Image (cartoon, rainbow, N blue to C red):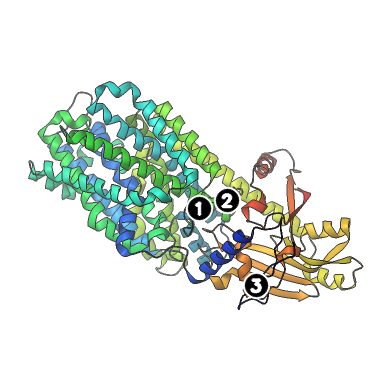
Amino acid sequence: MNPVSFRSPDEKQLPLFDEGALDIADYLKEEADAEADIHHSPITRQSLTALVVGAVGVVYGDIGTSPIYAFREALRATAGEGEVAGLPEVLGVLSLLIWTLILVVTVKYVFFLLRADNRGEGGVLALYTLVRLAAGRRSIPVLVLAIAAAALFAGDAAITPAISVLSAVEGAELVLPAVEPFVLPVTVGILVALFTVQRRGTASIAGLFGPVTAMWFLMLAGLGLWHMAAYPGILAAFNPVWGAGFLIEHSAVAFVVLGAVFLAVTGGEALYADLGHFGRRPIVIAWFALVFPALVLNYLGQGALVLARPETAENPFFAMAGGWLLPVVVALATAATVIASQAVISGAFSMARAAMQLGFLPRMTIRHTAEGQSGQIYIGTVNWLLLAGVLWLVMAFGSSGALASAYGIAVTGTMVLTTILATLFLIRTGRLPVVAALLAVSPFMVIEGAFLASNLVKLHDGGYVPVTIALILGILMWVWWRGTQRVLARTHKLAIPIEGFVRAMKDSSATRIPGTAFFLTPDAEMVPSALLHNLKHNRVLHDQTVFLTVETLRVPYATAEERASVERLGGAFVQLTLRFGFMETPNVSRAMTHARRAGLRFDVMTSTFFLGRRRPVPSGSVGAARLMDQLYALLSRFAADPSDFYHLPRDRVVELGERVAI
């Protein structure tokens, strides 16, 4: 079959196709997608109302399920065995809950951190890149803070689905006491189903998240108002004196109570992490118009119920609903907890992708599950490891009450590290002098430090779980980053500068063959080892040799102008740089349209991509350093195929391997 040529007004000639090469429809779709990237932002524009409803479902799904167990656990920590919480205890706990929501969530996240965005993107890794850019150089302490925060998030991501779904299913015992033996099997079944459907994407059901969660918050508010009407005096809990007095009067158990109170703000980090998905304004509107009032009203209603009927302190949330309403509440609670778990799982995928792009984790295969939505991704390795951790937690602890002891340390640790990074951001960017910045964040450091200390008390009762998870992941992230830097340093030391190589090749006797050769290289100044091996063994050069470097920017998304740059080096040699943000999946095939716009001309039918597959080999002496090198070498074997990770054209890739001593 004769090759077919496609032309457009913007290009002299588009690539040629024939049978057995790239699929024409796939290529044209990539061309259209790349064209769309030029004119549209990564986040699809939606109406403000739709964004607010979406934020209710995704951003606030986790914090919205806290009323199921937060007040209950705080009361359990307050009253001793067989004791009943009185008015001072109930009002004191409620005051602590309300003011924690006000100070930690409203002031810190809504008023301050949502303004510290990196091109509209939020989260601890986005904050790290802001600090890194402001400093203008790498700082190992700041790097360690970012790795620790990302690792602690993994601990939170494992516990949230376990405690949320388990607590909701436990509510079914109030409707049908006979289901008690089946609580664990039902919980396991829901979790397995939830993680299994991840590979299909959540785009088809994500539209339900917002409305269902909005119904959940309206129900929280309604139940709260219903029981508050019988005891209006519960509004006295807004007075912070009750909270302060409680901590003074119950100093012996104050730390334990604070650890339980902090359960009310788990999920607060999602406000900042999901900034790029919805924008600041919808998140703020959703908080003040629905989420915050509903949470406060429900906590006040639970307190009013316990004062009126002390026996309900065992499970005050589900005791608020009686008769025909209880099954409805249990069903809605189960749906809300599944949605909250989904939000955390999606957040884990996004965090893993950002960590890979920043060089903290090995490459893993990323699948996009929805067209036009860059945030809808699936990472199989993360999904199944997370499921294994969640199931182990459910089976090991057995109840949401037991899991509550393990909950909190990861969240408080992440919040403390976020506050430290925010302080560095204020100082490094010059927004506030050092003294003023320290004074501004000191209230949050005191509050969050107290919460962290109170949660550390539960270290032996299950708190070691998220700490262990975070420690293991943190070590792996550090080992991978360190090993990658050592490999790059080693290869850079032995490599040949491109400038001298190009001059030397002018008089080369190597045979010239038609077509374009793309040699991927992480170092734009050095000759790729794959090219040297090709010359050594095959003694050929293509008519056009392109040194292709894929750069990860310290911004979430690259603009169309930043995407590609082309530099003529002389003779047949060209330097092509493709840039992607750390929240993007590098897709070289799609980015080739941007390369053509930058001036590169090539025929895809006579083009070949050459990859140098490096195998690290530990060569140091015995000790911790060699152990880390061995671990890095092991991790590198599990890294995804670079041709898949970078989305290179099918059947156009040649791999050449080499061993690198580290």
Indicate which label's residue lies in the foreground, 2 or 1: 2
Which residue bears the numbered disc 3?
596
Residue named by callout 1: 146
The three-letter code of the residue at mark 2 reads Phe
Q: Which residue is mark 2?
A: 360
Question: Which of disc 2 and disc 3 is earlier in sequence?
Answer: 2
Where is residue 167 shown, x and y percent of the image?
31, 34
Q: Nearer the viewer, residue 444 or 200?
A: 200
Disc 3, disc 1: CB below 8 Å? no
- Badge 1 crowding class, 10 Å Cα cut-off, few under 14, some 14 to 19, many 20 or more, is many
The CA span between labels 3 and 2 is: 32 Å
Outermost residue to the right = 509
Is 460 positioned to the left or the right of 238 in the image?
right
**Residue at x 10%, y 34% (from the top left corner):** 308
**In which quadrant of the rendered view does residue 450 lie?**
top left
Hey, which residue is sitting farthest front in the picture?
1
Q: Residue at x 47, y 38 (%)?
A: 196
Q: Indicate left or right for 21 with 195 as reference.
A: right
Q: Is residue 490 left or right of residue 345?
A: right
